[in-house]
């Protein structure tokens, strides 16, 4: 699509390149007897004007007003204090694009995350203030379905595993590319595992084996403050979709997804009841106090390192806390139900998307494609900040020996991260359901159901009724216009 000024990206690059070439050539020949303005006047023409500067409005993870200032990973560095590792990534991500597109500059601004980002984007659209490129995670598909993004090329999309781009796909087209990614796997504290008489070389492959192991660990793993515990995941919190990111892989494994990629709800499928019953067994191998307080009060990462938590779903970010403890731990892909199949949820999967109605839509597509298919920029966060892993297939395929993991501080943490890379590449990775509207309200309803099912220790018939009500609530929210 051509920009609103009627100049396509290709034409603009050609014109700027021609102007730059003319300047270079002009330096190699004798001076002209009269200025260009005088020549134009002599020819009866108005003086020529340089092309109008092009500024792309880029919504991103941090405000980067100046890419030329010095950034280094040091708490004493002013730029690091303001922009954290996003400042270093920006200086890796964007300069090659600017070098390839002379005359273009970027206005890079941050607009929060999660629900706040979603609200900022909705308000911007309503006000007609349209950036050229934006970003997101769980709510990307909602905006894809609004029809506000341009698709990227098939060649660009095929450089990523399906799970990392499914959240930006509709009707076979992909409306953004991932800048970074992550995947859930199952973390196991092997010290606590062996204290329960379990074999570190015989880790669970089925739901039944996992439940039995957690119940055995809970019997011997007593803590004065927290009681007897084994399994941990986030307790219900109606203010975030993060809880669902740690749980819904179990449902996807068992052919009981909460909803489709495009947000068609299926909360009350028969196998969903079986999955919640299994999940309750896992959850009640730990105390309510641990589930509801560990994240905010003590930190589940520290409690995992201390052995209070023995088993928990985690993503590559959790490996940073494992690295701090330097403990004897491992990670495996999730055990399976009878007749089930591998599944994991993509997490930390940031997708950057070009908008149709920004000022420079063609250049926005180029920005997304050129920056995010670059192996150097894809590798940067894992090798510096930790927390994330690359999203490019070409890097994930190296998971067995991948060594650009400098952000993870121990060999044990790096081995766990390699398991997350394998899961992202091969383990049935996929996004949360892409609700087309009222996403925040739907996740609040889901969390409320989670609370009642777990805290009430509901049985099969009660869970089915709860899920029927949840299905009806989601359908009503999807039907609402306000």
Image: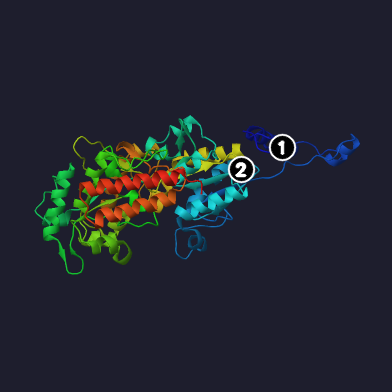
Residue 293 image point, x, y percent: 29, 64
Pick the residue in front: 179 or 129: 129
Residue 106 image point, x, y percent: 60, 48
Instruction: Name the residue located 24 percent from the left edge and 59 percent from the top edge.
Output: 304
Instruction: Name the residue located 61 percent from the left edge and 43 percent from the top edge.
Output: 358
Pick the residue in front: 228 or 414: 228
Does residue 331 sit above or below 44 in this rendering?
below
Pick the residue in front: 285 or 21: 285
Q: Which residue is mark 1?
A: 19
In the rendered structure, are the residues bearing label 2 and label 1 in contact, judged by CB atoms less than 8 Å apart? no
Query: Which structural element holds mark 2?
Result: loop
Q: Is residue 17 left or right of residue 72?
A: right
For this orientation, the residue located farthest to the left is 197
Query: Which structural element holds mark 1?
Result: helix
Pick the residue in front: 13 or 271: 271
Does residue 416 sit above or below 76 in this rendering?
above
Q: CA distance from mark 2 to mark 1?
A: 25 Å
Q: Is residue 111 left or right of residue 273?
A: right
Q: Which residue is mark 2?
A: 358
């Amino acid at each position: 699509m051509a920009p609103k000024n009627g100049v396509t990206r290709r034409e603009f690059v050609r014109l700027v390149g021609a102007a730059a070439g003319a300047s270079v050539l002009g330096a190699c020949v004798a001076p002209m007897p009269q200025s260009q303005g005088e020549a134009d006047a002599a020819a009866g023409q108005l003086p020529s004007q340089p092309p109008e500067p092009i500024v792309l409005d880029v919504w991103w993870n941090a405000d980067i007003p100046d890419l030329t200032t010095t950034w280094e990973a040091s708490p004493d560095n002013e730029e690091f204090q303001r922009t954290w590792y996003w400042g270093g990534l920006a200086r890796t991500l964007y300069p090659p694009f600017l070098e390839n597109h002379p005359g273009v500059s970027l206005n890079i601004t941050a607009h929060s995350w999660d629900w706040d980002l979603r609200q900022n984007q909705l308000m911007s659209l309503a006000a007609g203030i349209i950036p050229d490129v934006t970003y997101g995670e769980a709510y990307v598909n909602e905006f894809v379905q609004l029809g506000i993004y341009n698709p990227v090329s098939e060649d660009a999309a095929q450089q990523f595993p399906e799970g990392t781009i499914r959240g930006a796909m509709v009707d076979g087209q992909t409306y953004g590319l991932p800048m970074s990614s992550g995947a859930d796997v199952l973390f196991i504290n092997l010290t606590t595992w062996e204290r329960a008489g379990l074999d570190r070389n015989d880790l669970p492959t089925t739901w039944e084996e996992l439940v039995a192991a957690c119940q055995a660990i809970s019997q011997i793993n007593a803590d004065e403050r927290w009681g007897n515990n084994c399994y941990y995941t986030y307790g219900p919190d109606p203010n975030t979709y993060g809880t669902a990111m740690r749980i819904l892989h179990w449902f996807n494994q068992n052919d009981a997804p909460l909803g489709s990629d495009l947000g068609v709800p299926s909360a009350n499928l028969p196998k969903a009841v079986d999955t919640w019953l299994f999940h309750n067994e896992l959850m009640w191998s730990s105390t309510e106090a641990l589930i509801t307080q560990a994240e905010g009060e003590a930190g589940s990462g520290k409690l995992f390192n201390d052995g209070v938590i023995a088993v928990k779903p985690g993503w590559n970010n959790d490996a940073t806390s494992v690295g701090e403890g330097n403990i004897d731990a491992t990670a495996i892909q999730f055990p399976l139900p009878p007749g089930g199949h591998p599944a994991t949820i993509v997490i930390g999967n940031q997708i950057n998307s070009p908008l149709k109605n920004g000022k420079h839509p063609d250049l926005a597509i180029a920005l997304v494609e050129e920056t995010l298919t670059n192996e150097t920029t894809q590798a940067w966060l894992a090798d510096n900040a930790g927390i994330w892993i690359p999203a490019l297939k070409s890097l994930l395929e190296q998971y067995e020996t991948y060594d650009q993991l400098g952000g993870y501080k121990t060999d044990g943490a790096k081995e766990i991260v390699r398991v997350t890379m394998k899961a992202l590449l091969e383990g049935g990775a996929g996004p949360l359901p892409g609700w087309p509207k009222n996403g925040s309200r739907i996740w609040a309803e889901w969390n409320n159901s989670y609370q009642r099912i777990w805290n009430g220790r509901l049985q099969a018939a009660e869970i089915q009724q709860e899920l029927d009500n949840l299905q009806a609530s989601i359908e009503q929210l999807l039907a609402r216009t306000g």
